[in-house]
Amino acid sequence: EAITLAKRICASSVQQDQAISALHQLGTIDLELGRFAEAEAAYLECLKERGDNEWNHRRAFEHRRLGQLHALMGQPTAARTAFDKALEIAERCGNARFARNARQDTVAFVDIPAFLRKERPEKVCLSTLAGQFDPKPSQLQPAFRVLWQEHQGYLPLLDPKTGETTDEVVRWDVAHSQGFWHPVVMVLMHDGEGNIALQERGERDSMGRLDTTVAGHQEVGETDVVCAIRETVEETGLLMSPSRLCRVDKPYNLVKRGSPDVDNDGHESGLCYRYHTNKINQERASLFVARVAEGEELQPMDVGTGRTHFEWVPLLDAVHRVEQDPDRFASSFKHLLSDEILTLLQESMM
């Protein structure tokens, strides 16, 4: 809805500043969705339309967004240059708020990622990191998003008893090698007639196995709902509003434990699944179901992203197929097949 409205304003507004602002918002939506080329084109066009007036303080906002974009594209030098330009314009024009934002972004998008790249700490206390660099803990998310884009990500650390997020984050590889509890989300797409979409995974350790439609790790600073929306866009091409996601059970209430000590995969309880793996992996999952609307189509991702294609099957047929050929299915999907979770799924899909 936001994209449609902004495009309408761009096309029909007689006020130039209003049209430029709408184009800027389209760029920001692209930035949030990871469509970096489209975002950059929008911001550069905004700068072109604003002209060369040194006293136009809104030019600072375009440079600030370009700084964020460059940081997420793995270009820290270009990012710092853009933030410096934004600060220069804001200070010249006497806009204290824009200047403050440019300084904060330099810290969050450039300085903190540089520190974490160099030190590579296994665990990070967010409040300590905030105290060291002086932003609020809530302003740390961009730093971890930058590292996530570079495949040097950190995961939120969960309290093993309550399943709630703590003040610490743990490096991705350490979480999976040493068994730190961390959050994941799963989204199971259905068509309203009892059929579910299973994805065939393409990662090296899960090659060819069928899994839930969407599955992924929650980033630092994300809620499970935002994570589910992001992963759904990345893995199916569908942009869903929160209202379309039906939560199954409580947040992070599904427990999955992988260990070399497990000989036989299976449910330890209705909500807890144990499986054999060469590493120690301990996850708590939030599960959602979402109905694919008429006319919508799941878009297969490239093999390089770890996804190949989707297969629509009746839910109960999938249960029987797992019983006959368990090695064909990923542990995340087998996790959902206890009587307790199946009942919740069927109720949510009605």
Image: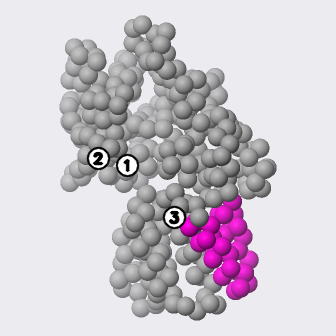
The dot on residue 234 is 1
Measuring from the top left, give residue 291's x and y in whole percent: 30, 44
The dot on residue 301 is 2
Q: Quote the CA–CA distance across marks 2 and 1.
A: 8 Å
First-in-chain label (3 vs 2): 3
* Location of residue 62 (image quadrant): bottom right
Q: Secondary structure at mark 1?
A: helix
Colour logic: one colour
Mark 2 is on which residue type?
A: Met
Write the residue at 29% across / 42% down: 303
Number of residue marks = 3
In the foreground, 147 or 75: 75
Q: Main secondary structure of the magenta part?
A: helix
Q: Quote the CA–CA distance across marks 3 and 1.
A: 18 Å
Measuring from the top left, give residue 106's x and y in whole percent: 66, 63
Q: Give the quarter of the figure containing the C terminus.
A: top left
Question: Callout 2 environment at 10 Å: few (<14), some (14 to 19), or many (20+)?
Answer: some
In this rendering, the answer to whether 179 lies above or below 69 is: above
Q: What span is in magenta?
A: 78-107
* Location of residue 273 (image quadrant): top left
In the foreground, 127 or 116: 116
* Location of residue 216 (image quadrant): top left
Mark 3 is on which residue type?
A: Leu
